[in-house]
């Protein structure tokens, strides 16, 4: 889907001022409220905007240990294991990947012992062959999309 200059201005405002009203966004952009709402609706429908809720900190929720777990799966069991991962609350996202492993899960844990418990649970899931875990020491670049939006606007 093509994102034009007005769309990138809208997206930039959404990211920089997420708690502002649609009316205020329209005023700041110098467009009609109905125009802005139509653009927002289209970008939601097209999957450009995927959520509007708050970003939450696992660390502030008592889970400061962040790890990335590579999961190797028995051939033909990827969907089954993927569904089982969705039932593990400590897994905050998971992806099918290429390279070393079949799945990559981002895991939030209370401490290292809790992380070990989560990993042991994953190892015991039907279809899981082995896991490899990497613990994050410090976040160097927080999740962000604003630089990408700016790049699209320039492009």
Image (cartoon, rainbow, N blue to C red):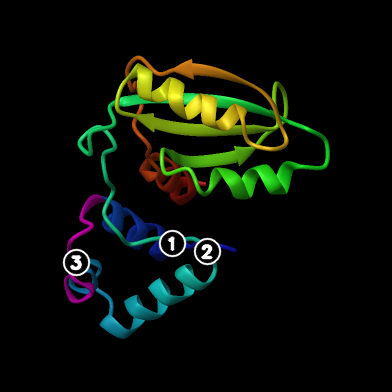
> Of helix, strand and loop, which one carries label 3?
helix
**In the rendered picture of this protein, how many numbered marks are placed on residues?**
3
Q: Looking at this rendering, what residue extends furthest in the right direction? A: 75
The residue beneath circle 2 is 47
In terms of depth relative to the viewer, which is nearer, 59 or 119? 119
> Which residue appears at 41% of the width and 23% of the height?
115
- Cα distance in 3D space between marks 1 and 2: 5 Å
In terms of depth relative to the viewer, which is nearer, 113 or 137? 113
* N-term mark: 1 or 3: 3
> Of helix, strand and loop, which one carries label 2?
loop
Label 1 with label 2: CB-CB less than 8 Å: yes
The residue beneath circle 1 is 49
Vertical relation: 126 (above or below) 115: below
The residues colored magenta run 16-24
Residue 35, by quadrant, is bottom left
Vertical relation: 104 (above or below) 86: above
Residue 21: image location, x then y, percent: 18, 71
Question: Residue 28 got which mark?
Answer: 3
Q: Looking at this rendering, what residue extends furthest in the bottom direction? A: 34
Asked if the magenta segment contains residue 18, the reply would be: yes
Q: Bin the neighbour count of mark 2 within 10 Å (Cα to Cα): few under 14, some 14-19, many 20 and up.
A: few
Asked if the magenta segment contains residue 122, the reply would be: no
Q: Bin the neighbour count of mark 3 within 10 Å (Cα to Cα): few under 14, some 14-19, many 20 and up.
A: few
Residue 82 appears left or right of 88: right
Dot in front, 2 or 3 = 2
Say which quadrant the N terminus sits in.
bottom right
- Cα distance in 3D space between marks 2 and 3: 24 Å
> Which residue appears at 35% of the width and 14% of the height?
137
Vertical relation: 83 (above or below) 61: below
Residue 6 appears left or right of 131: left
């Amino acid at each position: 889907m093509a994102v034009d200059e007005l769309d990138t201005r809208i997206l930039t405002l959404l990211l920089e001022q997420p708690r502002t009203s649609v009316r205020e966004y329209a005023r700041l952009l110098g467009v009609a409220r109905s125009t802005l709402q139509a653009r927002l609706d289209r970008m939601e429908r097209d999957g450009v905007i995927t959520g509007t809720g708050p970003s939450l900190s696992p660390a502030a929720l008592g889970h400061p240990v962040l790890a990335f777990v590579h999961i190797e799966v028995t051939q033909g069991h990827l969907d089954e294991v993927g569904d089982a991962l969705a039932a593990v609350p400590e897994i905050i996202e998971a992806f099918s990947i290429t390279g070393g492993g079949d799945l990559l899960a981002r895991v939030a844990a209370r401490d290292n012992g809790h992380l070990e418990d989560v990993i042991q649970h994953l190892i015991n899931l039907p279809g899981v062959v082995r896991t490899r875990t990497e613990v994050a020491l410090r976040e160097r670049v927080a999740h962000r999309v604003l630089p990408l939006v700016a790049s699209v606007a320039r492009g």
